[in-house]
Amino acid sequence: MTLKQYTIRLALLILGTIPLLFITGCYGARETDEMGFVTVLGIDKAGDKDKITYQIAISPKKGSTTPSEEDPWIISSFTTPSLAETRMLLNTTIPRPPNLSHITTLIISEEKARDGLNPILANFMRNRNYRENIFFIVVEGSAEDYIKQNKPVLEEQIHKFYETTFSSSNMGYFLKVQLHDLYIRLKTAGGSAYAVYSGINPKNGENKPQGGETPEQKGEPYLPGGIPRKGTATAVDFVGLAVFHGDKLIGVLDSDETRAAAILQNKFYNGYIGVVDPLAPEKDVININIFMTEKPTITADLSGDKPTFHIDVKLEGELLGVTSYINYEAPKYRELLENQTANLMKGQIMKMLKHTQTLGTDPAGLGLYLRPKFSNTAKLQDANLTALYEAAQFEVNVSVKIRRTGLLRQSSPKSQGGTL
Amino acid sequence: MKAQPGNMGIAEGMSLVFITTSSTIFLAAWSLAIDRTTTASWMMPLINTCTGLLTLCLLLYVLSVTSTDLYDACQLLVGTTATRLIVLYYIGIYFLDATLLLRQFAENTLLTALPELPFEIAIGWYTIIAVILSYIGIEATLRAGYIIMPLIILASFTVLTMLLPQYEILYLAPWRGPGLDKVLASGVMSSGINIGILIPAFLASSFQNTKTVKYSVLYALGLSCLVKTATLAAFIAAFGTGSAREKVLPFYELSRLVYINRYIQRIESLVIIVWAVAGILNITVLVYAGIYLLARLFNLPTLKPLILPVLLLISALAMIPEEITSVITLHTKLHFGLYNIGTMLIPFALFVMALIHAFKQKNSKKQPSCQ
């Protein structure tokens, strides 16, 4: 390379570098303190219009070191015929342009969900501001009231409350449901859509169980608002599953049924259950931590006029407490307890299956196992998998293996007349 | 020709073929493919890779018989007029493909990252970078592509791995989709998507030897097939066919879906950089191939003066369509139609002509000399 060529190239490089100084940062970029970050969106039915509620995060004030007494958010509700209009109206009430890309949770009232989700989802799936991993909740009552009454204590910001709640939802009494889960269930044959079911608890300690528990279980199934509790925790309960027939809300599953649906979908990790003591059923209870270590084996048979689903669930358990002090660690007693627990779980699964058959919805996605039975997609399209599910028969087999006994090797009888 | 590229090896060849055949995973092409072959769409890249390999065999035979590059081989086998028609066809489709890619990548930049950026500026930036790369030359561009290639593969498989909790394998059932016959037919018809595999044959004299062309196409096509098949299967398993067929940007949607926990999410901004680079390289390679053939066709001593006017024309053309849906639809129709002339019919015709040529040569050697 000659000196002249070198000089020209160097000059070109410098000329090319100078413009870079003027194009730093994103085009149309705004500072975070110039935007109003919407974190939660609620939708209620308001006659033939929608009431949209925005929960907008307030960023900490500059220089503030002590936590504010006021809620770190503002709530605004609008009644308009379309979501786009509402966004414009929101912009007229706050000085910062609203930014919707940080919405973590979408809350729909039960009344609105019964009208159908398709018109709502049409906005959320197309607009790049909304992400498919927004959590989706159906609430008993009004979404606006729910947003107003949910004041978390452990988390300062509301988006963190929802993210933490659903990131740890592995006990089975409620499931993590994102827009994506809901939408693909609406669009794909072989399972029905479902959503988290939540509501406000009056916190008066009143017990309102749903009933219908199996003879082997000590606890009772619940829906939001029915849990007997008092205290200073936030008023919302996450318990149960809102289930859909097509895009319309058709019913709700209680806590036990929700756990059964979670087990069949391999979305259950571990949970705590109180089992009626098989040898002292009147008053004693055995507390067990049950967990799932392998995916349930589900096969479908479509050879007859009705499909049959063969479901094999394997659970494992750890003893947490035996109030009767019977030695359930010993093989002969352990088998009794394992059968008792297996019957309990089988009963809850069967109850969920029968209930959902009646409702005409398949939240566990058993219809997916029918898909390979069709030789091509045209035949699958002709079939109505939900109708097949409604007519199906189930052969459910649950086995429970008590693997661990906690910190006690064996239970000793209760002392009657002094210690040994 | 003065601007005849230099001494390219397997790395450059692999980069060329990989970039031109795999960057479609970042576009809507595969979403539209799901309309045709539904749950079995993941088989299409496998099938069109097989037809691509067949094309490679045919081309290698043509090159071995004629001991030259594809342009000279055409002249030798079909004469000057037919060669001009063939080369004009390839120039046309390379420029057309570059135009459609430029429009789509520019639109996707607006859609995914910079919604407030004026559309003309997005097109302008892509064009400026393509001009600079073309001026630097095909060798340097392909070496840059060779550095980017592992990043594309790594980014793809990282996203696919992070989506493991989202997959439902039963969404791929019925396993045979609309029927194996229809999948096979659609797979063969989609061979046009691999139009880039012809470029090494045109640039054969710039490669070290025919073996270099052979192995670079072979390896790159294999890698590209692996990435496309895995991505498409993952796309269906994550979204189901009902939702997947609606999407404009399959790969972007996959990366947007990653949600491991509240700390590991929103990773799509990292992937956008990868596909933007892949898109620019693809546009550059196609434009360069078109200009190279143009220079050969008109026997021009150099091709550099053509770069700026051609890219300006392409950017102007890219801005003509009024909306993006027609661009996506046209691109898919070309993949399934017009491009197949270039990936299947012309190579097959040249192969037949090469067979006849070889047969004639053999006979002429056997005949005793009259002198």
Image: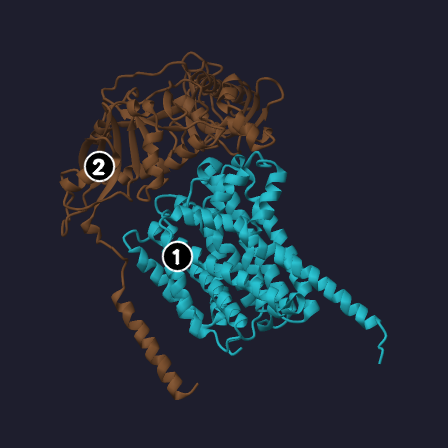
Identify residue for label 1: B318
The quarter of the picture where the N terminus of chain A appears is bottom left
Q: Considering the numbered disc 2 on the image, is that residue within a helix, a strand or a loop?
A: helix
B133 above or below A52? below
Dot 2 amino acid type: Glu
Residue A56, horizontal then vertical, whole percent: 21, 40
Q: Considering the numbered disc 1 on the image, is that residue within a helix, a strand or a loop?
A: helix
Q: Mark yes or no: residue A314 visible.
A: no
Residue lying at the far top of the rendered structure: A282
Residue A22 found in image quarter: bottom left
Residue lying at the far bottom of the rendered structure: A3
Identify residue for label 2: A85
Q: Is residue A8 left or right of residue A58?
A: right
Local crowd size for mark 1, using a 10 Å CA cut-off: few (<14), some (14–19), many (≥20): many
Q: Colour of chain A?
A: brown
Q: Nearer the viewer, residue A404 or A312?
A: A312
Q: Nearer the viewer, residue A104 or A245?
A: A245
- Chain ID, mark 2: A
